[in-house]
Amino acid sequence: MIVLGIDPGTASMGYGVIERTGSNLRAVDYGCLVTSPDQSLPERLLAIHACMTELLEMHRPAVVAVERLFFSRNVQTAFAVGQARGVVLLAAAQAKVGAREATPSEVKSAVAGYGAADKEQVARMVALVLGMASVPTPDDAADALAVAIWAANSERAGDRLTSAVLDRAAVAPLARGGTPYERAVREALARERASSAPKRGRTTPGVATPAPVRRAARPPRERAS
């Protein structure tokens, strides 16, 4: 099973490809796409899409794992990461490859056993898990390999990989009308309509039912001779 991990960003995008054989994981490819500051935002997003398309065609992954922005104090950074994530998910959808998402803390817990581990700890654990002779660089590539490790181990364990409600449409679209809340709302509306609808063929105690009005038949008109 081949897993492509992505650490998204418009200035740089880390990627890491790993292969899972049974319980063994090994690194296949990793690196970082760095866009030029002279490029406009559309040009940077186009470069990310081109890189994703090339990686998908080259490695044919079964899963694309993307780090999800959980919280950011810098709104501009959050927007930039969100735009890059959208391009990554678009490329995966175009290639008909399933996408998985994880917050940084989920990835750190899965790789280093600690949700607040720093980048050096994560990089060392990535090298240890993948049996690499040295720590992968740059940091974005190491983070992408960590995301791939999280997805590979979670898929092996049979876990259902989901994300927060705001991002769930990317990996597990909500089935409209299928949640307990939506069923309860439909049932309540149905009961309200039934109670307000006029009852036919029934009488209310203490209330006289008016007799039906019968119209007298008109005599037939005589034809003029």
Image (cartoon, grey):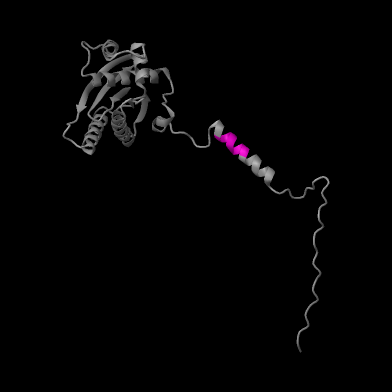
Picture quadrant where residue 36 is located? top left
What x and y, as percent, mark residue 91? 30, 34
What x and y, as percent, mark residue 70? 37, 24
Q: Is residue 28 above or below residue 95?
A: above
Q: How many marks?
A: 0
Along the viewing direction, whichever of 60 and 90 lies nearer the viewer: 90
Residue 39 visible somewhere in the drawing: yes
Picture quadrant where residue 148 is located? top left
The magenta region covers 182-188
Picture quadrant where residue 125 is located? top left
Q: Residue at x 75, y 87 (%)?
A: 224
Which part of the image, by quadrant, shows the C terminus? bottom right
Q: Is residue 42 above or below residue 149?
A: below
Q: Is residue 190 above or below residue 36?
A: below
192 relative position to 148: left or right: right
What x and y, as percent, mark residue 129? 30, 12
Which part of the image, by quadrant, shows the N terminus? top left
Q: Residue at x 33, y 12 (%)?
A: 112
- Residue 184 colored in magenta in the image: yes
Residue 22 visible somewhere in the drawing: no
- Residue 89 colored in magenta in the image: no
Along the viewing direction, whichever of 186 and 65 lies nearer the viewer: 186
141 relative position to 218: left or right: left
Magenta segment main secondary structure: helix
Q: Residue at x 79, y 77 (%)?
A: 220
